[in-house]
Amino acid sequence: MFGKIRAALLIAGICMLPALAWAGQPFDAKAFQASQAAGKAILVDVTAPWCPTCKRQRPIVEQIRKDRPDLVVYEVDFDTGKDALRQLRVQNQSTLIVFRGTSEVGRSTGDTDARSIGALVAKAF
């Protein structure tokens, strides 16, 4: 009986954990190309759930997205987004790529400084 109660409490506790917040929408090649064709400011965030640097970048990217509602943010999962990684020529997780339309205007890998990430994104505006 106690085993069933403990299992029920464990399941309830897991269900109450907050979902991992995503800073952007999942990368979709067609949506990305449409954003580029529209001349939008775009940030591509290459991330992995196991990456400590990505976890430090997450709140910075979320804040930038909130501060710049006209910025389109796409997230590429480093483990599953291999086609996107090839298309974007990315070799490492924690890579941030900024576009203004079809032009790449900046790229960084492993940066966790809010000011420099903000400056990187500002290049798209």
Image (cartoon, rainbow, N blue to C red):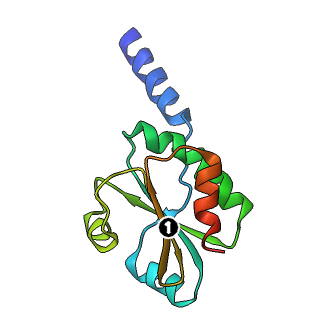
Quadrant of the drawing holding the C terminus: bottom right
Please identify the residue farthest to the top as the structure is shown.
2
Does residue 19 appear in the picture of this structure? no
Residue depicted at x 59% and y 81%: 40
Q: Image height check: is 36 above or below 2?
A: below
Q: Against 51, is 121 above or below?
A: below
What residue do we see at 57% from left, 89% from top?
38
Q: Please indicate whether residue 84 sits to the left or right of residue 32 in the image.
A: left
Closer-to-camera residue (6/108): 108
Q: Position of residue 110 (x, y in %)?
A: 43, 46
For the question of whether residue 6 can be seen, the reply is yes
Q: Residue at image x 43%, y 15%? A: 6
Question: Residue 101 appears at what percent x and percent y?
Answer: 53, 83
Type of amino acid at the residue the image marks with label 1 = Gly
**How many badges with numbers are in the image?**
1
Please report the residue visible at 56 percent of the width from the left and 55 percent of the height from the top: 23
Of residues 85 and 115, the one drawn nearer to the viewer in this rendering: 115
Residue 10: quadrant of the picture = top left
The secondary element bearing badge 1 is classed as: strand
Of residues 62 and 117, the one drawn nearer to the viewer in this rendering: 117
Q: Give the residue at mark 1.
A: 106
Instruction: Looking at the picture, tell me which residue is in the foreground, 100 or 22.
Output: 100
* 121 over 40 or under it: above or below: above
* Neighbourhood count class around disc 1 (C-alpha, 10 Å): few under 14, some 14–19, many 20 upward: some
Q: Quadrant of the N terminus?
A: top left
Horizontal arrangement in the rendering, residue 40 relative to residue 111 (left or right): right
Image-quadrant location for residue 89: bottom left
Answer with left or right where residue 95 lies relative to residue 122.
left
